[in-house]
Amino acid sequence: MTNNYIKKKKNKNIKIRKKKQEAIEQIINILKNKNKENKIENIKKTNIQKSVSWCEKYKIPCNKFTDKINIFLPIIKEPEIEAEQETQSV
């Protein structure tokens, strides 16, 4: 293994460890602080926003409303779209 590979691996491990530590600290703060439900709602909204950004980056269709629980849109195949349009026009 090269030194460059080892350095990259160590840097990735540090980033992963830092994210895990932040998540644990966030959970501890929620448990310690009053007004837990507001904090939980804020965390949910933040995570949904991150998910929407990820979906946009990878061109995955999703809803952009943070108040909805399921942000993913159903993927409809062409024959299903035509059948759906026919039933709507009747």
Image: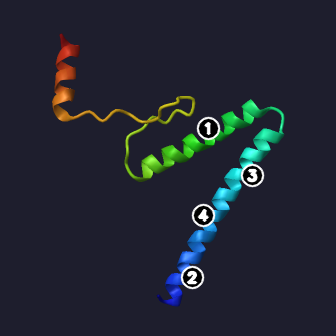
Q: Residues within 10 Å of mark 2 (few under 14, many from 20)?
A: few
Quarter of the image with the C terminus is top left
Secondary structure of the residue carrying tag 1 is helix
- Residue 5, given in percent of the width and then of the height, sits at 49, 83
- Residue 63, given in percent of the width and then of the height, sits at 45, 34
Q: Residue tagged by mark 2? A: 7
Q: Is residue 70 left or right of residue 73?
A: right
Q: Nearer the viewer, mark 1 or mark 2?
A: 2
Q: Residue tagged by mark 4? A: 16
- Residue 68, given in percent of the width and then of the height, sits at 53, 29
User: Tag 4: residue type?
Assistant: Ile
Relative to 58, does residue 72 appear above or below in the rendering?
Answer: above
Q: Which residue, as the protein is rendered here, is positioned at the far top?
A: 90
Could you tell me if the residues under marks 4 and 1 are in contact, i.e. CB atoms within 8 Å?
no
User: Tag 2: residue type?
Assistant: Lys
Q: Residue tagged by mark 3? A: 25
Could you tell me if the residues under marks 2 and 3 are in contact, i.e. CB atoms within 8 Å?
no
Q: Residue tagged by mark 1? A: 45
Q: Quadrant of residue 41?
A: top right
Q: Residue at x 17, y 26 (%)?
A: 82
